[in-house]
Image: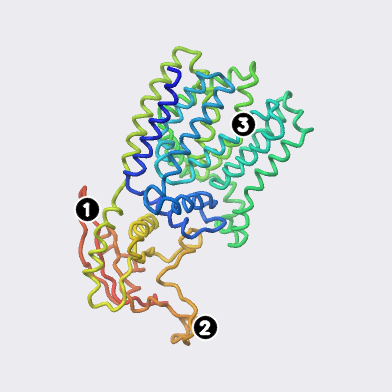
């Protein structure tokens, strides 16, 4: 029995490694892969930590599933250990064990453990930061504060909002008399400086790119809830942790809050989780589920809630049922990846070869949306096939940083059409042809396809496993869009 938790963690980690190698790459992961090949200090949708991590693992293990995903089962194992240490340190070993089990049945956690994304690294480093902060508040000394600040700064490289965790020790030092002595010591201030210093890369990137996220809104929009989007965001957050776990967590939180007036540790726990929960609630009010912040808050309080469940027979039974149901939901989510674009890319090379005759320059591909563009670019990277987004890129998303077929570039040749071309610029794709890969019917083709090429026709269809159908439109002789 002593080694059962270790065997459990080892077995789960091995299963995750196997799944990470067996399951198709999701479009969101292909997007991360593209970012990893265009490294910068930041991106439109967040910091550069995930892209830098995948860039490093791909350099070691190749651009396949192993290079893309190998780090994430390891992060899941470290996060599990961190949750156990948090729970055991504050509420005893049984609470730590049950908190670790609860974390490992959450659908979002299990999906993130086999797919590349920012959730698990941000969660893992946040938990490590919280563990260091708890030790520092308990008299752990300067080294604990420095370690906590560094871990929190690293978490911010994956999710900017994770940096708000540093506000937890500040709240504890304000509200809890026992910890007010920390205001007279340097550790708290150094941890704050290091944590906020972690925001420097993304701030530099935003400064360079004209603060694109702020340009999309005003102070009024930042302060105004998006009421129609709140139910969808809340539902997405609940599905990320499963309905039974959400109910159990709320019930356990109520029980833990009732005991907080008599015990210091529940108050310390909620002080640490409060800023993360507030940031999550702000995101919900603006129509964003933000499962990363929700999982950080739940993981921080998991040990205390597990302790509350172990002390009540009814709650213990409720918690057991919730864990079983959540585990079933996690298994379903893990095997529900859509392989459409992987299956399409397996035959697109042959289709391009059949369509190539009569076209002096290589055909390029156009995909209907960012997900499809990322996925096709990933799967067709070996053949160096050019894949572009259908629409002209919006400056509010990362695709505006990458090449597109309607870009003008500097040229030594004088412009032939002055009202379309500025100075000595030209478009190297003028006159080139492409295949547009989409599920859309001919009557639904957008103007960016019908007006951007001299002619287009349905070249063929792809019937993929499971009955999925994609249509291939041969778009001949690209021309600049009419003004």
What whole-number distance in Å separates the C-alpha atoms at marks 3 and 1? 49 Å
Q: Which residue bears the numbered disc 1?
A: 464
Quadrant where the N terminus sits is: top left
What whole-number distance in Å separates the C-alpha atoms at marks 3 and 2? 58 Å
SS assignment at label 1: loop
Q: List x then y, in percent, for residue 406.
A: 41, 72
CB atoms at circles 1 and 2 under 8 Å apart? no
Q: Is residue 328 above or below residue 48?
A: above
Q: Is residue 335 left or right of residue 403?
A: left
Q: List x then y, in percent, for residue 113.
A: 42, 39
Q: Residue at x 45, y 80 (%)?
A: 426
Q: Which residue bears the numbered disc 3?
A: 272
Please tell me how crowded label 3 is: few (under 14), some (14-19), or many (20+) other residues with Cα within 10 Å.
many
Q: Which mark is residue 423?
A: 2
Q: How is the image coloured?
A: rainbow
- Of the numbered discs 3 and 1, the one sitting upstream in the chain is 3
Q: Is residue 54 above or below residue 208?
A: above
Q: List x then y, in percent, for residue 63.
A: 39, 54
Q: Residue at x 26, y 67 (%)?
A: 352
What whole-number distance in Å separates the C-alpha atoms at marks 1 and 2? 46 Å
Report which quarter residue 142 is drawn in. Answer: top right
Quadrant where the C terminus sits is: bottom left
Q: Nearer the viewer, mark 1 or mark 2?
A: 1
Q: Nearer the viewer, residue 220 or 151?
A: 151
Q: Nearer the viewer, residue 174 or 359?
A: 359
CB atoms at circles 3 and 2 under 8 Å apart? no
SS assignment at label 2: loop
Please tell me how crowded label 1 is: few (under 14), some (14-19), or many (20+) other residues with Cα within 10 Å.
some
- Of the numbered discs 1 and 2, the one sitting upstream in the chain is 2
Q: List x then y, in percent, for residue 463.
A: 20, 55
Report which quarter residue 325 is drawn in. Answer: top left
């Amino acid at each position: 029995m002593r080694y059962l938790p270790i065997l459990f963690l080892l077995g789960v980690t091995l299963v995750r490694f196997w799944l990470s190698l067996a399951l198709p790459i999701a479009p969101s992961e292909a997007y991360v892969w593209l970012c990893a090949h265009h490294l910068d200090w930041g991106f439109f949708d967040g910091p550069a930590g995930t892209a830098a991590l995948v860039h490093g693992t791909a350099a070691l293990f190749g651009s396949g599933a192993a290079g893309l995903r190998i780090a994430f089962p390891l992060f899941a194992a470290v996060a599990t250990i961190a949750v156990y240490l948090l729970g055991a340190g504050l509420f005893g070993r049984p609470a730590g064990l049950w908190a670790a089990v609860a974390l490992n049945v959450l659908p979002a956690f299990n999906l993130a453990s086999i797919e590349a994304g920012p959730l698990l690294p941000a969660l893992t480093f946040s938990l490590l930061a919280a563990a260091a902060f708890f030790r520092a508040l308990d008299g752990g000394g300067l080294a604990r504060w420095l370690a906590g600040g560094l871990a929190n700064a690293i978490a911010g490289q994956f999710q900017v909002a994770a940096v708000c965790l540093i506000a937890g020790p500040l709240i504890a030092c304000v509200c809890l008399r026992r910890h007010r002595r920390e205001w007279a010591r340097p550790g708290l201030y150094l941890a704050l400086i290091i944590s906020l210093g972690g925001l420097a890369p993304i701030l530099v990137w935003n400064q360079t790119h004209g603060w694109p996220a702020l340009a999309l809104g005003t102070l009024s929009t930042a302060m105004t809830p998006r009421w129609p989007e709140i139910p969808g965001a809340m539902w997405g957050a609940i599905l990320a942790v499963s309905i039974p776990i959400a109910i159990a967590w709320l019930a356990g939180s109520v029980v833990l809050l009732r005991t907080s007036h008599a015990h210091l540790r529940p108050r310390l726990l909620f002080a640490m989780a409060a800023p993360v929960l507030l940031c999550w609630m702000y995101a919900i009010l603006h129509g964003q589920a933000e499962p990363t912040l929700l999982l950080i808050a739940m993981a921080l309080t998991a040990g205390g809630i597990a302790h509350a469940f172990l002390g009540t027979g009814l709650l213990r039974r409720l918690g057991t049922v919730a864990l079983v149901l959540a585990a079933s939901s996690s298994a379903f989510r893990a095997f529900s990846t859509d392989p459409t674009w992987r299956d399409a890319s397996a035959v697109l090379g042959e289709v391009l070869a059949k369509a190539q005759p009569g076209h002096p320059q290589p055909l390029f591909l156009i995909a209907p949306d960012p997900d499809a563009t990322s996925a096709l670019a990933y799967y067709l990277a070996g053949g160096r096939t050019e894949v572009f987004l259908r629409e002209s890129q919006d400056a509010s998303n990362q695709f505006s940083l990458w090449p597109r077929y309607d870009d003008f570039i500097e040229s030594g040749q004088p412009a032939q059409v002055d009202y379309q071309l500025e100075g000595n610029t030209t478009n190297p794709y003028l006159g080139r042809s492409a295949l547009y890969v989409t599920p859309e019917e001919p009557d639904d083709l957008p103007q960016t396809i019908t007006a951007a090429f001299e002619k287009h026709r349905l070249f063929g269809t792809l019937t993929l496993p499971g009955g999925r159908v994609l249509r291939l439109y041969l778009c001949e002789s690209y021309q600049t869009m009419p003004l």
